[in-house]
């Protein structure tokens, strides 16, 4: 029996002809889902679909959604669609209702919002609130998608039975002037509407769905725990490359587990101590997460004005706070870099592979200036290691893509490679100083625990201290001095020794371990208040995994690989064309004119070269040029009458651009944002030839935040 809300849906379609899902009710679980279809029917539009009571409430949005709160987009409410429509992609045949191409432009989970509360963890409350708000004609809701995030509103208009407005609320995701619709690929198949138009086979139905927590292997329904000890990485001798691993820059800060429940935030140190009061700057950003319950794992880092991490600055921040002063007076920025998510809205995620947790984190985390998602990369750990060292980080952390979260354990599924040998050691005493150090100390005696109870002596560290550190440390050491040695045994030393209770942990870098088991050339780095002395053992670096991947050096095609036949088809069109032609390039139309116009005159017996020759050349070099042009703002150098005529420079395009030419808004010297063009695809490259942009001038930098050395898409 047909579900009554789907009668209109059924009456408009012949299911012997259309591949669309049959009109049967659905039964979702967990958070409510949303999907946005990009639909090229009689006109291009976007369909917003929100799950409610087993169906998808649907609105057609002719102009597409905007991330600009100033944009008020018309949204026409249409018939309810079946729950199975959430995974539909394909081609609706001509003559059928809505005939045309359909892709899943975005999907994810959503929740109604009221007075700052959301209900991702309570499906029934969410649905009850949605019913009530729809009946009143005003709905505020939160999207957690791959492309769209943040707070939106649907408001019913007085004129027109089904006319609504959809508006982006002001929040951290609001982006005036953004070009979100230029992200034109399906989030599940990678196809574009234009690919389906040009004959690409549609994905098998049903297409993959949005992430559903309860469908991910290893995820389980569970109450939110009150604490979760962090998973620890094992040291390795050197960086390595392997496609089975993720790689992250190793941060120089304090490891923090953050627990968020209904807007209340608690920060726990590695040892489980509540240190929420130590980092007030990050609390607002964590409170504003679009989740009822969430546990995050990350690193608290202090950034200098240059953006480089500074551990000493982090310690200074804590010292200033403990003196009762305002830490905002310091010229540093405290930032919480999040790299893992362990719990979300009623589900324990620790049993899921980190590849799934990373995807959930990308969708669920509401980032801010103080709370940031840590970038990670696949495959080339050696390049990332070098880039990390060059930019002031300690090294890299490698994480197996299929690894689960081993709370409280040091695991070989997470590996850390540093620029130098370093470790944490327990301070067990100090040697008396002389000369300039007469009032402080000459060196610290340090060790580690092989077994609980007594320290194993690892040597003395006497360098790496400035005067202020020497004075402060001496005061601290005097307060914990003791007659009893904390070491199992210690060699005879030339200076008087004062033992201390084993309460301090020092981080020390060194050249190597000697055969006798002592540190060679140790240098003091800092005290680690976040480390528990009882947990300090000797950490020996293991060899890098044997199955490492050789780094490929050849240039690959751009992110979406274009079949070689596609280039040949374009070449054939250019060669066979008359003076003017409309080229069909990857489903895009490009009008080119005056193909036989001379751009380079005859020279020393060589024939003249024309615009046609330039188009042919650009097409042939595109597989090699486009990866280097990608995401680099362009300055045009146009020669409308060829290289012997005049030329002019052009940064901005004031007329309507072809839809395939991507742009980015960038700040200029006067602080005003202007649109710059990007050459990210073959149609744009050939359009540049059409407008006689003979010289391709790009910025050295990309608009993508990752530097070139970290662009691993070709590996």
Image (tube, helix red, strand yellow):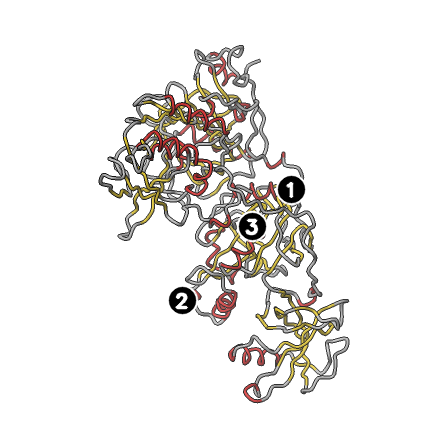
Q: In terms of image quadrants, where is residue 458?
A: bottom right
- Are the residues at dot 1 and dot 3 in contact (C-beta closer than 8 Å)? no
Q: Which sits in the foreground, 645 or 429?
A: 645
Badge 1 marks a residue whose secondary structure is loop
Q: CA distance from mark 1 to mark 2?
A: 42 Å
Q: Residue at x 70, y 62 (%)?
A: 540
Q: In the image, which disc is placed on residue 352? A: 1
Asked which quadrant contains residue 243, the reply is top right
Q: Residue at x 27, y 29 (%)?
A: 597
Does 164 sit above or below residue 621?
above
Q: Are marks 1 and 2 in contact (CB under 8 Å)?
A: no
Which residue is disc 2 drawn over? 329
State whether residue 384 appears in this view: yes
Instruction: Check disc 3 and report the residue beneath it.
Output: 339
Residue 578 in the image: state x and y as whole percent.
Answer: 32, 21
Relative image position of residue 512 (x, y in whole percent): 67, 68
Mark 1 or mark 3, earlier in chain: 3
On the image, the x and y values in percent for residue 488 come to 77, 75
Callout 3 secondary element? strand
Tell me: residue 283, above or below residue 153.
below
C-alpha gap between disc 1 and disc 3: 15 Å
In the rendered image, is residue 76 in sight?
no
């Amino acid at each position: 029996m047909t579900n009554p809300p789907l009668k209109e849906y059924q009456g408009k379609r012949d299911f012997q002809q259309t591949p669309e899902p049959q009109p049967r009710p659905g039964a979702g679980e967990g958070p409510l889902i949303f999907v946005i279809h990009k639909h090229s029917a009689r006109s291009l539009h976007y369909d917003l679909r929100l799950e409610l009571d087993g169906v998808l409430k649907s609105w057609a949005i002719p102009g597409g959604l905007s991330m600009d709160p100033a944009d008020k987009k018309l949204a026409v409410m249409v018939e309810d669609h079946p729950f199975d429509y959430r995974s539909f992609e394909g081609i609706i045949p001509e003559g059928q209702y809505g005939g045309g191409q359909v892709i899943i432009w975005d999907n994810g989970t959503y929740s109604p919002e009221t007075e700052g509360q959301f209900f991702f963890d309570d499906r029934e409350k969410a649905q009850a609130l949605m019913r009530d708000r729809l009946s009143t004609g005003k709905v505020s809701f939160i999207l957690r998608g791959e492309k769209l995030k943040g707070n939106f509103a649907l408001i019913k208009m007085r004129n027109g039975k089904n006319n609504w407005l959809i508006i982006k609320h002001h929040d951290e995701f609001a982006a005036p002037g953004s070009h979100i619709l230029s992200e034109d690929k399906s989030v599940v198949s990678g196809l574009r509407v234009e690919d389906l138009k040009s004959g690409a086979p549609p994905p098998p139905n049903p297409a993959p769905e949005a992430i559903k927590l309860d469908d991910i292997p290893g995820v389980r329904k569970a109450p939110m725990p009150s604490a979760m000890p962090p998973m620890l990485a094992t040291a390795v001798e050197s960086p390595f490359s392997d496609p089975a691993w993720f790689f992250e820059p190793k941060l120089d800060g304090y490891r923090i587990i953050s627990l968020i429940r209904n807007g209340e935030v608690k920060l726990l140190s590695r040892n489980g101590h509540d240190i929420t009061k130590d980092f007030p700057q990050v609390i607002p950003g964590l409170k504003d997460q679009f989740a009822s319950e969430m546990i995050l794992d990350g690193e608290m880092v202090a950034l200098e004005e240059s953006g480089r991490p500074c551990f000493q600055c982090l310690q200074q921040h804590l010292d200033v706070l403990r003196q009762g002063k305002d830490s905002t007076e310091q010229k540093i920025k405290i930032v919480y870099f999040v790299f893992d998510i362990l719990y979300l809205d009623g589900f324990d995620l620790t049993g899921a592979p980190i590849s799934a947790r990373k995807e959930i984190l990308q969708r669920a985390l509401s980032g801010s200036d103080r709370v940031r998602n840590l970038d990670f990369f696949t495959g080339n750990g050696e390049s990332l290691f070098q880039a990390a060292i060059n930019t002031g980080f300690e090294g890299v952390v490698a994480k197996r893509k299929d690894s689960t979260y081993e709370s409280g354990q040091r695991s070989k599924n997470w590996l850390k490679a540093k620029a130098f040998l370093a470790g944490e050691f327990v301070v067990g005493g100090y040697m008396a100083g002389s000369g300039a150090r007469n009032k402080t100390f000459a060196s610290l005696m340090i060790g580690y625990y092989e077994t609980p109870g007594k320290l194993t002596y690892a040597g003395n560290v006497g360098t790496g201290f400035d005067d202020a550190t020497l004075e402060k440390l001496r005061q601290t050491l005097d307060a914990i001095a003791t007659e009893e040695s904390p070491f199992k045994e210690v060699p005879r030393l030339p200076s008087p020794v004062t033992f201390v209770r084993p309460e301090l942990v020092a981080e020390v870098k060194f050249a190597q371990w000697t055969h006798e088991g002592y540190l060679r050339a140790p240098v003091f780095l800092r005290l680690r208040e976040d480390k528990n002395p009882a947990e300090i053992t000797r950490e020996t670096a293991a060899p890098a995994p044997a199955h490492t991947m050789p780094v490929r050096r050849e240039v690959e095609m751009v992110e979406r690989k274009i079949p070689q036949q596609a280039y040949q088809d374009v070449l054939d069109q250019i060669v066979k064309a008359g003076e003017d032609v409309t080229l069909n390039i990857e489903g895009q139309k490009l009008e080119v004119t005056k193909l036989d116009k001379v751009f380079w005159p005859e020279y020393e017996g060589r024939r003249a070269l024309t615009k046609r020759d330039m188009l042919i050349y650009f097409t042939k070099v595109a597989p090699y040029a486009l990866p280097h042009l990608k995401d680099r703002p362009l300055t045009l150098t146009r020669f409308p009458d060829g290289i012997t005529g005049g030329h002019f420079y052009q940064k901005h395009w004031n007329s309507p651009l072809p839809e395939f030419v991507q742009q980015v808004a960038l700040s200029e010297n006067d602080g005003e944002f202007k649109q710059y063009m990007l050459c990210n695809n073959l149609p744009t490259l050939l359009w540049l030839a059409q407008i006689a942009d003979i010289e391709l001038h790009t910025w050295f930098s990309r608009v993508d935040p990752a530097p070139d050395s970290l662009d691993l898409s070709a590996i």
